[in-house]
Amino acid sequence: MNSLSIEIRPVTPPDVPAISALAREIWQATYPGIITQEQIDFMLEQRYGHERLYDDLEDVHKWLDQAFYNGRRVGFAFSEIYKGEFKLDKLYIHPDVQRQGVGGQLIEHVAARAKKNGYPCVVLAVNKRNDKAIGSYKKYGFTVRESIVDDIGHGFVMDDFVMEKKL
Ligand SMILES: CC(C)(COP(=O)(O)OP(=O)(O)OC[C@H]1O[C@@H](n2cnc3c(N)ncnc32)[C@H](O)[C@@H]1OP(=O)(O)O)[C@@H](O)C(=O)NCCC(=O)NCCS
């Protein structure tokens, strides 16, 4: 199938409320059944609260990209330097346009940035029960490097695979 033709633009401060709202919409379509509603609410506040996103935009080690299709914001990818590696930290595509190549294009965009900056691979963490995302990452060249359980506080853990894509 042909990929949707998207435009990728950096997130700017005026985009923050829309990114935060889009994150909630996609998380609510993705994570019930994988993690509890309490954990969804906790993680959304921790990662997509407006102040947190404004701080991320100021961080020189982070890149926040958003994708538009026909002028509509349909997804985003955040990447960062984390513990000396290049990490795809967040990749979220609206359910209306999933499985139409948008995620793949954002992965390639991020991978190109990592390569340009001299990194040998892109890493990410994905919930072990998020089969669709794991399938998508495998399709784009990621393999599982390790299995981790990360305590994120308030009694919650992230039960993840760390995956990497060699560049
Ligand atoms: C995972 C995600 C980022 C992939 O982006 P996408 O634009 O849908 O994916 P692409 O069209 O580029 O790639 C398609 C591949 O993804 C996987 N995939 C995506 N949606 C799927 C679905 N509904 N069912 C099964 N597999 C799916 C498949 O491997 C698919 O390949 P195939 O069509 O050849 O079988 C996107 O589906 C998404 O945002 N999901 C919800 C949020 C999420 O889980 N994000 C990742 C957090 S780590």
Image: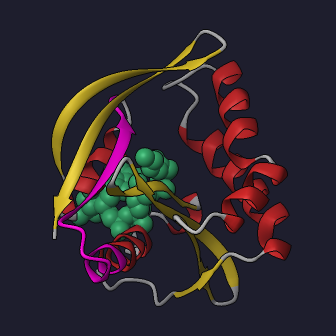
Residue 146: horizontal and vertical position, in percent? 19, 32
Q: Quadrant of residue 17?
A: bottom right
In the rendered image, the vertical position of residue 74 relative to residue 10, given as above or below: above
Residue depicted at x 68% and y 75%? 11
Residue 163: horizontal and vertical position, in percent? 24, 46
Q: Is residue 117 magenta?
A: yes
Residue depicted at x 78% and y 55%? 21
Which quadrant: the C terminus? bottom left
Residue 72: horizontal and vertical position, in percent? 70, 81
Disc count in the image?
Answer: 0
Residue 138 seen from this side: no
In the rendered image, the vertical position of residue 120 relative to residue 12, given as above or below: above
Residue 51 seen from this side: yes
Which quadrant: the N terminus? bottom left
Q: Nearer the viewer, residue 141 or 129?
A: 141
State how the image is colored.
secondary structure
Using residue 152 as the reference point, say whether residue 148 is left or right of it.
left
Q: Quadrant of residue 39?
A: top right
Which region is colored magenta?
A: 112-128
Residue 59: horizontal and vertical position, in percent? 63, 63
Q: Nearer the viewer, residue 72 or 140?
A: 140
- Report the image quarter containing ligand 1: bottom left
Q: Quadrant of residue 30?
A: top right
Residue depicted at x 47% and y 90%? 5
Using residue 30 as the reference point, say whether residue 134 is left or right of it.
left
Q: Is residue 108 magenta?
A: no
